[in-house]
Amino acid sequence: MQPVRKVRGWCAVVALAAAVGACETARNPGGVQRDQIPPSISLISAGDTQQIASGLQFTVDASDNLGLKDIRLTYAGGFIAQTDTIFNTTVTGFNQATTVSFPAGSGAGGFITIIGRATDGAGNFAEDTIVIFLSNVQALKVVLLAPGTGALAATGKRITVSVSAAQLGGIQRIGFLVVPRSAVVDSTPLPINTADSVVYTSGFPDSVVYTDTLTVLATTGTFTVTGFAVDVGGRRALSSAVVVTVQSPANDVTPPVVSHIIAARVEVNDSITVHATDPSGISLIGFQVDTSLTLTGPPLTLFTVNVSAGNLTDVTRTMSLGLAALISQFPKSVIVRGYACDLAQPTSNCGYSQNSTIITAPRRFSGPPRATTPSGGVDTVVVVAGRTFALPLGGKIADAIFNANPGRSELYLTNPTRHRVEIFRLVTPDSGVFDPAITFGVGVPWGIALWPHDTSGAYGDSIVVADAGGTQLAIVDVAARLLRWRQDLPNFLIETYKILTSTGGGRIEEIIVHDVSDRPQYVATVCHPAGGTACPADSVYALYSTTPTVSSTSPFAGKATLRMERLVSPTSATPLFSHLFWELAQTAANTGTDTLRIELIRGNASTIVLSACRGVSVNLNEFGLGDSTYARNSGNFAHGFFGEGGTITTQFARVMRYNVSDPILGVGTVNVCDTVPGGPRTSLANGEDHVATGMSPGFHVSDFISNTGIHVSSIATNFNGRTNVVRADSIYYLDALLRLKATSCTLASDLSTCLSGAPGMDMNYFHDFSPSGSCTPNCGGGTDRNNRFLFAARPDASIDVFDTFDGSQFLSAGAPFSIPIRDPIVGPFRVARDATGTNQFLFGITASGLVMVRLPTLTNPNPAPPRR
């Protein structure tokens, strides 16, 4: 089988047919019988739904009794194309797997119709058709919002048609199809460029909703409504079709057909969607909320909207539940029903939902809910705490920090997928708003921290953002909403030093270099005050972990490091300072260790910041950290805490701590040593020896390893750094020296199984306790034992509360207490106070966006001495 140009292949077949005809005419005056047997073709899909990343996959199987001439594939719908395979040799059978690949950013997707046509040499043909749904977030999506399934219509009444379309590349046309079109007429004159559709010639929107109102002319039967849209690439997509039944409104004594859609777990201001249809038209539509399954007595709320002026037979309304002033204790079970009345004369008919749909899966940043369950029209739903705000452009949130300064009350969230720092302003204790289009010029923002003013907890209106898209930190003035400067980070070379003996008896110095030019990921900030508590501009340091790059060589491939950077304005004369925390990996010398040497590269300058003369021994295979190592600073900016997360190769995950009260030594002083006692001095072993004495030494890190699990999913540290919490297979409470003091686990509903998988946790903002120390007046020496709490997210959309002194779960009225929210936490989790200091909030990232919960006042029932 060889494909040839179509014209040449056709000529060859014609010439062959002419020759056969002449020959047979000479030999057989009756001529030859023309081939009348068509070929066969079958298209076999690799799956009804396929991911665009894997391409469009199917198999073509075709055959013919004499020979195939051409196989044509025509693609329509979410992908438009045509291909031909032409044969110039005799081929009676053809079976080939076909994969259509798409470039990055392709808008192809949705339902794609593939028509295969096989043609033989006599012109006989056969066709087969398959439809594949190509899953692509950038594909053209069309949804018929109205009319809804089961819609009714009546002569002279009106019906609304509403179509939604979205495609990132832009929408060229959107409209609807009515079959038969004579069943309806437009109620109002349409713009000149509209005939059941809107056409855009410029400024193509990426999402649009087109709505039209039609007057019904049909007196009986049905008509079908289908939405459609065309994107700028010419791809056309259809919505699902809805059949509308035309009925007579005469002698109408039947209530409207009512249904509703609501989530199984709702917040007080979540919405309910009610759909009502009636041949007499809809007068009122709404919903009722009751607190008793008997449905007797006054309802908690009854809300209706008068839509009679529209004279519509099919009405859908989405309404807020509006329960904020009616419910204060969560969770609260309520009974919800849709409600509607018709326009029948002389007496209106009213009724509740006859059927309904419960949303049983978390919402998404954008798009429809993932899973629904039919129900019977009377639904018990759970009202939960908090309010969820969708991210302005969707994306993924990597880290978050709250600014409680007067006039600010803002949460800053890094959105690396949208290259933005989102700013959420707290408007009231129960509501807030996202500021639009905040980018600041930060490439791929990841970790985030506040700018300290002193070691008593005061901070400024600037944030430090780790740019994981480059090798820099961004310092952003959030009050002025602008980028102050980008601080370039140096490159570090991690080296091993050995003295080898040559065959002639000489000595050779061997240095093996490992380049770890990684990018910053998570960041914390501390300050080293010169005296007192104030933080001068040259005393602020960023402590950051890195994300490994593909250029990192073994044994650092796929591994991160932990580093320090003094933050220096470009206009300052303060010298730059950087440090790679080698202290956490130091170990006793043995046959499996190496002597460590570290070189710092900044611009064209190179400095030895840890000399071989220091004699630091490390095991290089255990030096690197997991590729998502978390960093947090204490509320007073005097301590840093780190947990090894992500992919790790060591047997156990590690945690580290940093204390600013311990100095940085060796800066500016060169250590000179002899490679051979009494022999000549060498320059390769010499250099400065920078030592961060505040970093936890290797034996402290090892001690933690022996007590905990293997995968760290989140960390937390309190206001003064005396309580540090790690979430791995359980929740571990450590003191300032990383000694294990208590453990907890989030429990299943039957209190018998520890749950894992939820990443978020944080401590009360005012938490100043230690899991060690005196119990007079409060265990751990804190100021108020009611602040001694840790809040930990559960994978089942609840927040557990623990006493950090002994790890016990907080009890309310003798029962375990948890805070219910609508969707499970899947990202960063923060507990913060507002500018007044009287309100505390929980902020967490869910699949729906940002959830905000105003925390209730909790009274710790545990006595001051530890319970036995």
Image (spheres, rainbow, N blue to C red):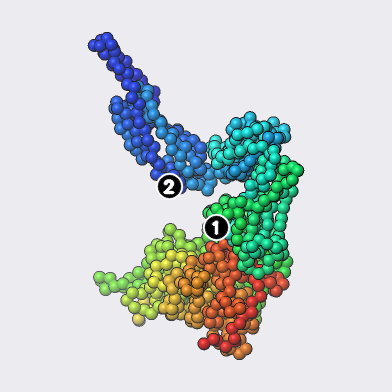
For label 1, count other residues whose C-alpha is less than 10 Å away and answer few (under 14), some (14-19) or many (20+): some
Quarter of the figure that contains the N terminus: top left
For label 2, count other residues whose C-alpha is less than 10 Å away and answer few (under 14), some (14-19) or many (20+): few
Mark found first going from the N terminus, 1 or 2: 2
Percent x, y of residue 511: 37, 68
Percent x, y of residue 669: 50, 77
Q: Residue at x 30, y 14 (%)?
A: 21
Residue 572 showing in the rendered view: no
Q: Residue at x 49, y 46 (%)?
A: 135
Question: With respect to residue 38, does 166 lie above or below?
Answer: below
Residue 49 showing in the rendered view: yes
Can you tell which quarter of the image residue 454 is in? bottom right
Q: Residue at x 64, y 62 (%)?
A: 294
Q: On the image, numbered disc 2 is attached to which residue?
A: 54
Q: Nearer the viewer, residue 8 or 568?
A: 8
Q: Residue furthest left?
A: 27
Residue 411's disc is none
For the residues labelled 1 and 2, the Cα–Cα distance comes to: 29 Å
Percent x, y of residue 192: 69, 31
What amino acid does circle 2 point to? Ser
Q: On the image, numbered disc 1 is attached to which residue?
A: 360
Instruction: Identify the element where label 1 is drawn.
Output: loop
Can you tell which quarter of the image residue 484 is in? bottom right
What amino acid does circle 1 point to? Thr
Question: With respect to residue 608, does 285 lie above or below?
Answer: above
